């Protein structure tokens, strides 16, 4: 009985957190929404590393590599535009000899 109450309280806490997560972007500005998204990405990476190194004792270089690949892809999509976009406009002052769009 006591274990069922603990699981019920945990599920209620998760449901409340998920509810806040779904409602909060509609209550804040775009700037703060972007900051919350960035905090969420870091939270996922931190929890993944904590799970891997804390519970299993393994050292992971893969998390850093995947975060770097994601950052590089995001920067490339911001500079060159996404594959489905119709315009290929460049930000002002973005001339680079290494860029191929």
Image (tube, rainbow, N blue to C red):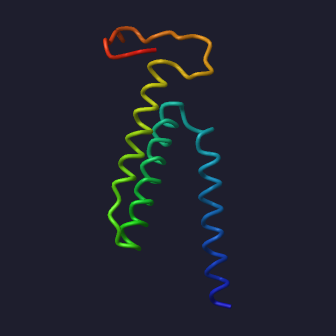
In this image, 79 relative to 30: left or right? left
Q: Position of residue 47 (x, y in %)?
A: 44, 60
Image location (x, y in percent) of residue 29 = 54, 32
To which quarter of the image does residue 6 belong?
bottom right
Horizontal side of 70 relative to 11 (left or right) equals: left
Q: Residue at x 67, y 76 (%)?
A: 8
Compared with residue 79, is residue 45 higher up or lower down, i.e. above or below?
Answer: below
Residue at the image point whose x is 39% and y is 64% from the top: 50
Q: Nearer the viewer, residue 93 or 31?
A: 93
Q: Residue at x 60, y 73 (%)?
A: 10
| Figure check: 7 above or below 32 | below
Residue 40 vs 70, above or below: the answer is: below
When asked about the image quadrant of residue 83, the answer is: top right
Q: Position of residue 32 (x, y in %)?
A: 48, 36
Residue in the foreground of this view, choosing between 52 and 31: 52
Is 29 positioned to the left or the right of 18 in the image? left
Task: Identify the residue at horizontal 47%, vertical 54% (top origin).
Answer: 44
Q: Is residue 35 above or below residue 15?
A: above
């Amino acid at each position: 009985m006591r274990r069922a109450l603990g699981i019920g309280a945990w599920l209620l806490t998760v449901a409340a957190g998920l509810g806040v997560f779904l409602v909060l972007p509609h209550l804040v500005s775009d700037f703060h929404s972007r900051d919350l998204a960035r905090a969420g990405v870091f939270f996922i990476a931190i929890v993944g590393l904590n799970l891997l190194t804390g519970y299993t004792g393994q050292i992971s270089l893969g998390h850093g590599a995947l975060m770097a690949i994601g950052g590089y892809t995001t920067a490339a999509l911001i500079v060159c535009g996404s594959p489905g976009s119709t315009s290929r406009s460049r930000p002002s002052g973005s001339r680079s000899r290494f860029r191929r769009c």
